[in-house]
Each structure stands twice: as structure tokens, then as C-alpha cells.
Amino acid sequence: MQSGGILAVVETVDGVARPLALELLGAAATLQEAFGPVTALVAGHSVAPAVEHVSVLGPQWVLVVDDPQCGHPVTALMTRVVATAWDVVQPALVLLPGTTLGRDVAALLAAQRRVPHLADVVHLDGTPDEVVARRPVYQGKLLTTVRAPRTHPVVATVRAGAYRVPESRDQRARIEDLAVPFAPADQRARVTRMVEKPRGQVDLENAPVVVVGGRGLGGPEGFAQLAELAELLGGALGCTRAVSDLGWRPHAEQIGQTGKQVRPRLYLGVGVSGAVQHTVGMQGSETIVVINRDPNAPLVNMADFALIADWKEIVPRLIARLRERRGEEA
């Protein structure tokens, strides 16, 4: 296998690649000219579906670690996996997803190898002498440019939504199994239980439509209508930090700097003012629609379409119209 290039680490859950990890292949596609060929590392348990998916997304090689020990997100085990792949590939750039596991592994790996670590990046580029990255600071109010010399390999974690998953190609990557020499110390932490979200819920981070409620709803009661609207649109329900802090909705639905990052085809904000803490988590949405009584709300200025009105007059009419159309289709 050719040394150098890019090593993209693809996390899996139940044998399926995480969408955020697949976005790394979109990043890698833009960087091949500067860094060289792309090797994807797919790790987990029963990962055949993920390997098949990844193999047609543009990498030249796919390294596979299919081991029951990798079925749960354990930092030490995953760090050992990535380190083993690193020794085989000898990459110039290592990309990990900005997940909880990815951030932990990236920091530990960079410290072990004594190499630069660029965290939470939204754009990457390279010159013959350095790796150049942009990352948000001050709760997303500013973007800063950070650089790392290419005298050593560079580890980077990529923020959700920064790149798109590439289109499938006819050409398939070469696939190789990778044996990992796990050590007893790698198994000191064990996962005893995984808590699954209720079945039927749409994954907020990957939903094509996201309906978001803000403090402008006036109370938790209004979220029942937003949940119904989200279900009719085939999307997911989200909220702002203010709503989560008030206890109206769970933190798992919070979008923003301290919550989820979303990039839906349609974002519908209802009673959302548009504080920077929130907009940094949804600014990559393709189409932004807002319902708000305040014409000067920051999110109104960001919106592709804004309806200046009381949500109580608009949302029930939307629900009725969507139910009418569903009935016609049925």
C-alpha cells in the first residue's frame, strides 16, 4: 500500500457508517490534490454494509477492522485501531469525525504521536508546507484560521455539516482486512449498556426536514403541534438552548453550539429569534423558513422565506393542509 495521503476514520453503529463519518470522504475528496490518495478506515462489528457503502464513495483503499470489541464506542480500543492503520498507511493527514468518540480519539492519538491536532474544523486546505484550517470561535461568532506545519502528520476533527457526503461512483476501492494487536490496557473501560432512542423518531442530525421551536412559542404546550408538523413533513423536531434550559424540551433536541449540528434540506423555525448560539448549528441548511412575529429577529434576516405572523395562526393551518393532502394521496 502506498504511504502518505489521507486516512479518513469511519465510525460505525450497528454495522452502518455514521453519516458524519461519511462526510470525511467529502472533505478528503477536496484534499487529494494537496495530500495524496485516500484510505478509509472502517471499524466496528459486522461492518459489511458500511464497507460496501464506503468503497464507492471515492477512497482508493478501505481498511476494515471487524471485531466484536469494536462494537461499542471505547476510546482506548478505537485509538489502538487508528494507530495500527496509521502505521500501515503512514498518512500525511488523519481525519476523524467531530463526534464524542472522534474528538476523544483525535486528542489522545495526537498526544501519543506528538503531532499537531486541529479540532472542530469547518474547512481544510493544504500547501506544500502546511495544513490550513478554519474553525469557529467565540460560540461561532468568528472564524479563525489555524495552521500546522507538514513536517509531521496532522490530526484533524471535522465539524458536522462542514462537508457533504460524496456521490457514489462506479469505481470500487480496494478492500483489505486489518489485524489489530489489542493490549489488555485497551480494555480497561467497558460499555455495559447502550440506551437507544425511542423507535420511530427521525434522527435529528440527519433529518431532511427539521422543525425547530423557540422561546417565542410561549410555553411547552406548543411543541405538540410542532411535533405533529414535523411528522407530517417526514422530519424531526428540534429546539433552541433557551427552550432546553427552561425544561420545555429535552437537551437531545437542542440545536446549536452546545447541541446538535444540523444541515437539512428544509429548516423551519417557529418562534426562534436566531441567537448566534443557535444559528451556528443550523447555518448550513439549504432552505430556511421562519415564522416569527418580530420582523427584526436575526433569523428573519437569515431566512430564505420569512412569515411575520403569530405561529398560532399559521401552524394549525399548515397541519390541516398537510393532512388534507395526505388524505388526497391516500
Image (cartoon, rainbow, N blue to C red):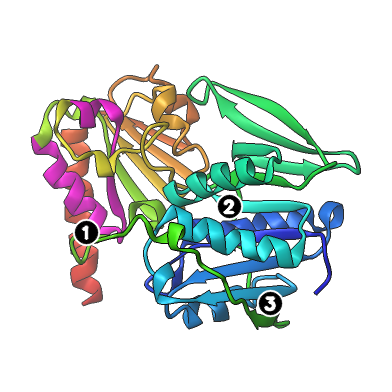
The numbered mark at residue 169 is: 3
Question: Up-down: is 54 above or below 254?
Answer: below
Q: Secondary structure at mark 1?
A: loop
- The percent position of residue 47, horizontal first and vertical second, equals 47, 78
- Residue 96: give its label: 2
Residues under labels 1 and 3: Cα distance?
Answer: 35 Å
The three-letter amino acid code for the residue at tag 2 is Leu
Q: Is residue 224 magenta?
A: yes
* Residue type (three-letter) at the residue carrying disc 1: Val
Q: Residues within 10 Å of mark 3 (few under 14, many from 20)?
A: few
Mark 2 residue crowding within 10 angstroms, few (<14) / some (14–19) / many (20+): many
Please tell me whether residue 65 is drawn above or below residue 308 in the rendered image: below
Amino acid carrying label 3: it is Arg
Name the disc covering residue 266, or none. none
Residue at the extreme right of the image, as rendered: 128
**Magenta residues?**
221-245
Which image quadrant for residue 32? bottom right
- Residue 119 drawn above or below residue 47: above
* Of the pair 325 and 56, the residue shown nearer to us: 56
Q: Which quadrant does the N terminus fall into?
A: bottom right
Residue occupying the point 47% across, 32% down: 280
